[in-house]
Every structure is written in C-alpha cells, then in structure tokens.
Image: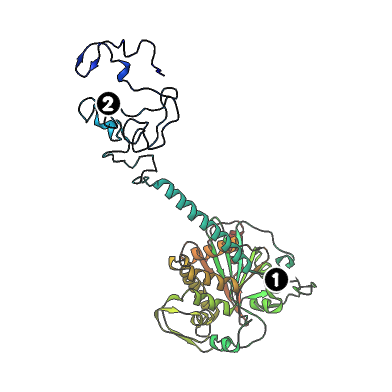
Amino acid sequence: MNEWPEGWSDDNRGNRYGRGSASAQPEGARVMRQVRRGPGAAPGQGGGYGQGGGYGNGRPSAPPYGGVPQQPGYGGGQGYDDYGDAQGYDSGYSDGQVYGGGRGGGFVPNDDDPDPEYAGYRARPNWRRRIKVTVLTLVTVLIVTSVATYFWADSKLHRDVDLSKVIDRPETGQGTNYLIVGSDSRKGMSAEDKKKLHTGSAEGQRTDSMMILHVGGNGDTLISLPRDSDVEIPSYKGSTSGKVYPGQGRHTKLNAAYAEDGPTLLVRTVEFNTGLHIDHYVEIGFAGFANIVDAVGGVDMTLDQGFKDKYSGADFKAGKQTLNGEQALAFVRTRHAFATSDLQRTKNQQKFLSALAHQVATPSTVLNPFKLYPTMSAGLDSLTVDKDMSLWDLASMFWAMKGVSGGDGKSMNMPVSGSAGGNLIWDKAKVKTLVNELKNDETVTVSGN
C-alpha cells in the first residue's frame, strides 16, 4: 500500500530535480523511501542517520517528531546521495559522527564531561569537600579523646579529705586558696624503696612541706609555711571519731597538727592561726613525688652551690644538672645542710616546683602521649585531694603554680619575726596585712623571709 499523499504517484511526478535535473519541481515519490510504521530497529542496527543506527557509536536514538522511528540512511550507510559519489552529501553522517559532539572520530572529553560511561572520564577532585571531611574527622577524634581522657583522669583522683568536718571556719574571701602538702607518707613503699629514697621507716605521717597558693584576679601568690612554725592547736572535730576536742591553748610545730589528726586538723589549724579560708586541699607523698619526676624524664636544675646531707641522701655539686626522682626527693627534703634549715628548704622546694612545672608543660611532654599519660597517671595516682576538688580546680592550681614559679606572680615564705624553743614565730602584723590582701584579692605588698 502506498502511504504517500494523493497526487504523489509515479505518474504525476513531473520533472525531477536530482540526477542533473534542472526542474524546480520536487522529485517523485517513486524515488523516495517508503515510511512504514512498525517496531524500531534493535540497538546498533539501522534506524539511524549513519552506520549502526542512532546518533552515533551504536547508541539508540529517541523517535523524533511524535514517535516516528528513525529511518535507515539513504545510501546504505554512505550518506544521502546514492546516485552519485559514494561519499554522499556529508560523510559525517555515514560513520557515526554527529555535528556538535558525540563519541565518534577524534572526540576528546575534558575534565568537566558529565558522562561517567565514557572510559576516559575522570572527575576533577573536590578538594573543598576532602578538606572539610578531614577537619571534621580530626575534630571528632580530638573531642572523643579529650572526653575519654577527662573521665579517665577524674577516676584516678583520690578524694579522701572531707573539709565539711572542719569546724568554726573563717568566711570565704575573693579568689581561691589551696593548701598544698608534701607528706612523708611511706604508704605502699617496699623496704627497698625506703632504703633507696632515704625515707626511713618512721610510723605515721608528717608534713615535710606546706604551701598556700592563692589564685586570684590580681596576681597569684605562693606562700611557704615552714613546718617548724609555732602555732596554736584549736578546738577541732576528730576526723574518724566525730568527737569535738576543745582547744587548750597548746602550742606546737605546724607539722604536728597533721601528725595528730591528719588533713582536717591541719586545715583547721592553718585557718585558725591565719584567719584565711582554705578552699581546697592537695597532698602528695614521697613515692608519688619521685614517680612524677621519673615519668617526666627528670628535671633540670642549676645549683649555686653544692651540698650534702646524709639524712636525705643529698649529694649535689654546683652547676646545671638533671635530677631523677630519687635525687629530686633528696633535694626538697634537705635541711641539715643549711644554717637556716627550714627556711632554706622551703626556698629549695619552691625552686624545684618551678622547674618541675615548666618541665611538665613543655611541648615535648604535652604533645607526646607516651610521656604525657605516664606523667598524668603518676601524678593523679599520688594525689590525695578534698571531696569537692574537680579536675578543673586541679588544672587551675597547676597553671597558677607554674605562672608564679615562672615570675608571673609572687612566691614567698610566711613572714617570721624570730624563734622560740626551736619554733619559728610569725610576724603577726605582716601576717595580718598579708591575709587581708589575699581575702580581698589585692596585689600582695608584704615580703617574707
């Protein structure tokens, strides 16, 4: 059946153009291909503008103009004109190429080509996204590590001191006051450890060093309390019995208060004799102190003169040297080698704590987890603190002590006016001025011995 419109038969085609015809009339239907409706050709077979059907490279094309399938090429795949030159009207149609691109011929895609099916396609790296993912990953790891470290460190604190048992306390002032104590506790030490560290085997506990650290807005102040200071033992509540013992006006050395009833009586005695409220209590024993020094890799010290002390085991030469845990303990405990025994010892203790704080805070320690965590573990395992002490309070104390020792605050001994019966007598006028300045968080103007 002829599907061409009426009038387009072979009989009335008239003159034709093509084949050299000069006629203006269109060529007859006889030479036109018939259009038949039916199923489209299979992919890669006919039905396109060139070889392989479709627009190029064997890919099927969508039917144009309302669903009429693509028709075979006019020259057996060689072009429009099968009457003349075999190359046809435009050889670009016969070999699968399409004007405006396609996949045939010498087409070369660029990096922005959106077709991932092409074998040579490679997406341009999205560096902004990669950097964002990397930063988020690092932040997440940092947060998780910090939180885990916090709970680990918090669990290691020994909160054994209950300051609520301290009675008749003075009013709190501005700033925060820490009572820092170095005890001669030999708890957990073997006989070999005691011999190595020259601690002896005395029973009970005494305080080898005591300091008040005031942390405030007008400069931090570190005040050493000589253990031979003459103090009055006030009324107090027994730490274990709960019984209240009335004061009898009894005077003794300051370190005897700790030996009598531990930390709570020591805090009560310091508050009674100074009028200064103690907010937090921190204590470290012999073994813990030595372990911290060893964990940090030793502490560098420069000594103006050498000295020996058979009681503490000290044997030092003048000059710069690195002290290990055993040597450090001997250094801060030595007093028999000095004329002003207790006062010189407190100065040595402050000097060593300054060096230790700076050693702990160096990048080689803070940024090295193999050194930081052992140091933190040794310190936290060795500390005894009050029940209200948090890690933030402990960190605040450490940085304040580091600042004071480094020259950002003031360090001093409690002002002393003389001695009586082997006990050091505090200068009451200077102590009163000092305490008032600390209570009001003012810059300290008082100087110590």
x, y (%) of residue 325? 50, 80
Q: Is residue 448 visible?
A: no
Looking at this view, name the residue that lies furthest to the right: 243
- The reply to whether callout 1 and callout 2 are in contact (CB within 8 Å) is no
x, y (%) of residue 329? 52, 80
- Which sits in the foreground, 99 or 65? 65
- Amino acid type, label 2: Tyr
Q: Which residue is mark 2?
A: 80
Helix, strand or loop at disc 2?
loop
Image side of residue 76 versus residue 246, left or right:
left
Snapshot quadrant of residue 117: top left
Q: Quadrant of the N terminus?
A: top left
Q: Is residue 388 visible?
A: yes
- Which sits in the foreground, 429 or 358? 358
Snapshot quadrant of residue 171: bottom right
- Residue 264's label in the rendered image is 1
x, y (%) of residue 341? 53, 81
